[in-house]
Amino acid sequence: MSVSRILKWVTGAFEAFLAIPVLGGTFIVSLFWTPLLVMLILHIVTLIMTKKDEGKTVGSVLGIITSCIGWIPGVGMIMHILSAIFLMINAAQPDNKSISNNPAA
C-alpha cells in the first residue's frame, strides 16, 4: 500500500472524528481551531503524495476546502462528513502508479 493511500485512511479517520456533532466541535473549539490547521497541513501533504502516486485527489482537495471553512457551525460538520467519505473511498481504490508498476494487477 502506498504512502498516499495510508495518509488518505488517516486523514479520513480524523475527518470522521471531527464530523461527530458535539464531540468534534468541542474538540476543535477547545483547542482554538488548531485541529483545522493541522488537518489543512495533513491534507496538503496527502495531496502532494497522491499526485506523486498518480491517485485520485478529490478527497484531499475537499479536505483542504473543509479545513478552510470548517469553523462555520453546521457547514463544517457536513463538510467533515463529506471529506471523510471521499477520502475513505479514494483510499480504498489503488493508485494508478501502483497498478502500472504491478503487471499481475
Image (spheres, rainbow, N blue to C red):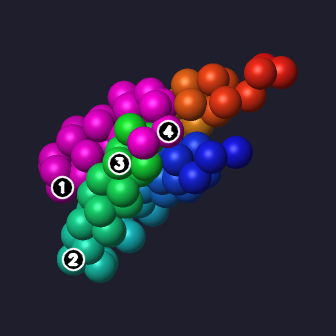
User: Tag 2: residue type?
Assistant: Phe
Identify the residue position indicated by label 1 in the image. 71
SS majority, magenta: helix
Q: Position of residue 66 (x, y in %)?
A: 26, 44
Identify the residue position indicated by label 3 in the image. 48
Judged left or right of residue 73, residue 49 is: right
Identify the residue position indicated by label 4 in the image. 53
Q: Which residues are magenta?
A: 52-76
Q: Is residue 79 visible?
A: no
User: Given contact means CB atoms under 8 Å apart, are the residues at marks 3 and 2 in contact?
Assistant: no
- Judge by depth and name the residue closer to the eye, 45 or 98: 98
Q: Position of residue 100 (x, y in %)?
A: 63, 23
Neighbourhood count class around disc 3 (C-alpha, 10 Å): few under 14, some 14–19, many 20 upward: some
User: Tag 3: residue type?
Assistant: Ile
Q: Secondary structure at mark 2?
A: loop
Q: Secondary structure at mark 4?
A: loop
Classify the position of the C terminus by image quarter: top right
Alpha-carbon distance for marks 4 and 1? 31 Å
